[in-house]
Image (cartoon, helix red, strand yellow):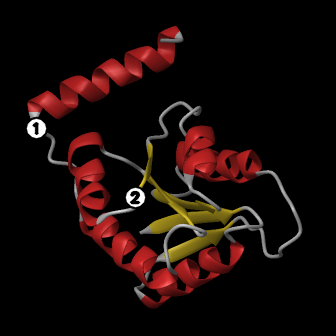
Amino acid sequence: MRIAIGADHAGYVMKDAIGQYLRNAGHEVLDFGTDSPEAVDYPDYALAIGKAIQSGDADRGVLVCGSGAGITVAANKMKGIRAALCEDAYTAHQCVEHDDVNVFCIGSRVIANELALDLLRIWLSASFTGEERHVRRLSKIQEMESTEG
């Protein structure tokens, strides 16, 4: 799987650990940065990962910021991007199974690296169920995107 990763200054250390984990698991990683503690703006990284998914260059994305909240909000502003803040095992698999989430978001100041990697593993192993009720709901979300909801 091709996975785009990105983080702001608060999340770059965790992003690097995630990138290494993904490479070791056999995934192709597209790293959009950042790579230092110098302050940057998280929406820039959400935009880069979103564009990679929209263009088909990446299948899924991973975003990290301090809390995970800001980067999740930013990513969800993009058409076709369904980002979820995954802080527990249930959310990590359910958001893919029911909502076909394509961007995993995490907060480096909230979740330890080891737990983040466990949650990422769960998220990556989940698949969209394709059940009619979930497809119907996703269609409504797509309609919201096209009509400014």
In this rendering, position of residue 35 left or right of residue 99: right
Residues 92 and 134: in front is 92
| Residue 87: percent from left, percent from top | 39, 61
In this rendering, position of residue 56 left or right of residue 127: right
Residue that label 2 marks: 86
Identified by mark 1, the residue type is: Glu
In this rendering, position of residue 84 left or right of residue 9: left
Residue that label 1 marks: 131
Residues 142 and 42: in front is 42
**Disc 1 versus disc 2: distance between alpha carbons?**
22 Å
| Residue 58: percent from left, percent from top | 52, 58
Residues 111 and 99: in front is 111
Identify the residue at the far right of this view: 38
Identified by mark 2, the residue type is: Cys
Residues 146 and 116: in front is 116
Upstream in sequence: badge 1 or badge 2: 2
- Position of 36 relative to 126 (above/below): below
Identify the residue at the far top of this view: 147
